[in-house]
Amino acid sequence: MDRPALYITRLLPPPVLEAIPQQYRLLTSPSDDPPTVTELRQGFAEADAVICTLSDRIDASLLSHATRLKIIANYAVGYNNIDVVAAAQRGIVVSNTPDVLTEATADLTWALLLAVARRVAEGDRWVRTGTWPGWRPTQMLGGEVSGKTLGIIGMGRIGQAVARRAVGFGMPVIYAGRHAVVSPPGVAWTQRSLPEVLSESDFLSLHVPLTDATYHLIGRQELPAMKPTSFLLNTSRGPVIDETELIAALEAGTIAGAGLDVYEQEPVVSSRLLTLPNVVLLPHLGSATLETRVRMGLVCVKNVAAVLDGRTAPNQVR
Ligand code: DGY
């Protein structure tokens, strides 16, 4: 019998590729560059299992070529890149990589929070120009972090991991989310309405999946409700924020700054954002540590193996 065919759309860290069981036949040698539409189509047409990434758009038209495909293992926790309804209609399992990237993404959220409030990237750029005149009492004054209120929208795994880190900064945490969550011993996370979280937070961090309901969750009406001294952080998905409205708010100074890891039209970043000093811009680094990216890959391999062996995928979505 033919070995099952596995299509991996992108180069993954070597330990992941080494963990792929010998009994699978790799359709292509994975490359760092995104596949073309034709390559994706061919891969989906020939594969029994696919490991794909968040920037591969897996829509109904692509899935119509997938006549023997049993599982799409998405190398991400978010799976808004996949038409899961169309996949389910074809009996194709979709899996994701929850848990293993929670801590890395929470760490990066804090890197953004500290960087934008304390003007870390801006200061680094200045020193590199060789024009820094030396310490001055009024120089590059940023926003205080310790003791300020951290607001979280979306109190799932990553939101809670971000909230846990606030203890060390003595920051009260308020959150808006569908469900009340249990605070860890000794701290009190307070559930509030979205308008309350918007108006009371000094730092507002977004941790919702991208769905029809969260598209442009933060936009024309929400940004003016934030404090002019507040900072917005996004390590979830770009389209959760209406980027045009955010840029207008940053330009007008109706919020103090933003730390962004994700963008509406990735990898295109608005030229207006690039010129703003009060933003820190990262290239979608949320899960980008070697350890985490290896764990994510191993989760994908495990889900593929389960389905190809006739078992339930441990991380099947919905
Ligand atoms: C995810 O898994 O959804 C992250 O955005 C990957 O970095």
Image (cartoon, helix red, strand yellow):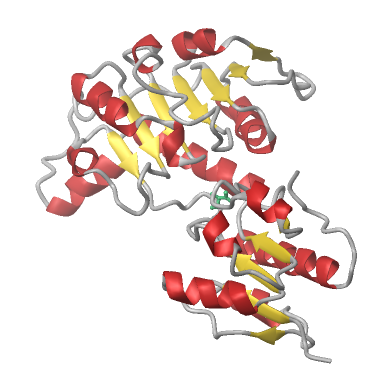
* Left or right position of 42 against 144: right
Image quadrant where residue 1 sits? bottom right
Residue at 74% x, 84% y is: 24
**196 or 37, nearer to the observer:** 37
**x%, y% of residue 65?**
59, 69
**x%, y% of residue 98?**
70, 49
**x%, y% of residue 68?**
72, 73
Residue at 49% x, 17% y is: 148
Asked if one can make out residue 58 in the rendered structure from this viewpoint, the answer is no
Image quadrant where residue 192 sits? top right
The residue most toward the bottom is: 1
* Left or right position of 133 against 49: left
Asked if one can make out residue 18 in the rendered structure from this viewpoint, the answer is yes
Residue at 68% x, 62% y is: 73
**x%, y% of residue 282?**
38, 48
**Above-or-below relation of 179 to 157:** above
Which quadrant, please, contains the C terminus?
Answer: top right
Q: Report how many numbered discs are placed on residues in the image.
A: 0
* Left or right position of 113 against 188: left
**204 or 54, nearer to the observer:** 54
**Above-or-below relation of 233 to 249:** below
